[in-house]
Amino acid sequence: GELHRACIQLAALISHELDNVMNRGQEFAKFELVFGDAALILRLPDLLAEITDDDLRAVAAELTPTSRAVVEVVAGATR
């Protein structure tokens, strides 16, 4: 369905982004900074493929219009 198509499109986008050496370096750096694992981007399409429609419904049910989150990424900050 729609979820499967979105995963395929995202996997294609990731593959395209990683074709360029500069983009690849930036994406690896971003994933290392945010997740502590640069190689995670290479596993991302497989991880996204594991998401089910029921997973999305469960997460969507937890969201409310008044919920807000702010994430601040600070380079060099300790975890």
Image (tube, rainbow, N blue to C red):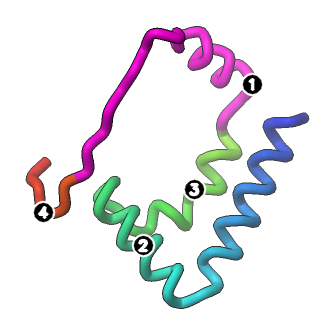
**Mark 3 and mark 4: span between their CA atoms?**
24 Å
Q: Residues within 10 Å of mark 2 (few under 14, many from 20)?
A: some
> In the image, is residue 79 above or below residue 75?
above
N-terminal of the two: label 2 or label 4? Answer: 2
> Is residue 18 inside the magenta stretch?
no
Q: Is residue 17 rendered to the left or right of residue 34?
A: right
Mark 4 residue element:
loop
Mark 1 residue element:
helix
Along the line of sight, which residue is nearer the eye, 20 or 49?
20
Mark 3 residue element:
helix
Which residue does the image show at 53% across and 11% down from the upper left? Answer: 65
Residue 70 coordinates in the image, percent (x, y): 32, 32
Give the magenta part as a residue range: 51-73
N-terminal of the two: label 3 or label 4? Answer: 3
Circle on res. 53: 1
Q: Is residue 75 rendered to the left or right of residue 25?
A: left
**Mark 1 and mark 4: span between their CA atoms?**
37 Å
> Is residue 57 inside the magenta stretch?
yes
Q: Which residue is mark 3?
A: 44
Along the line of sight, which residue is nearer the eye, 33 or 42?
33
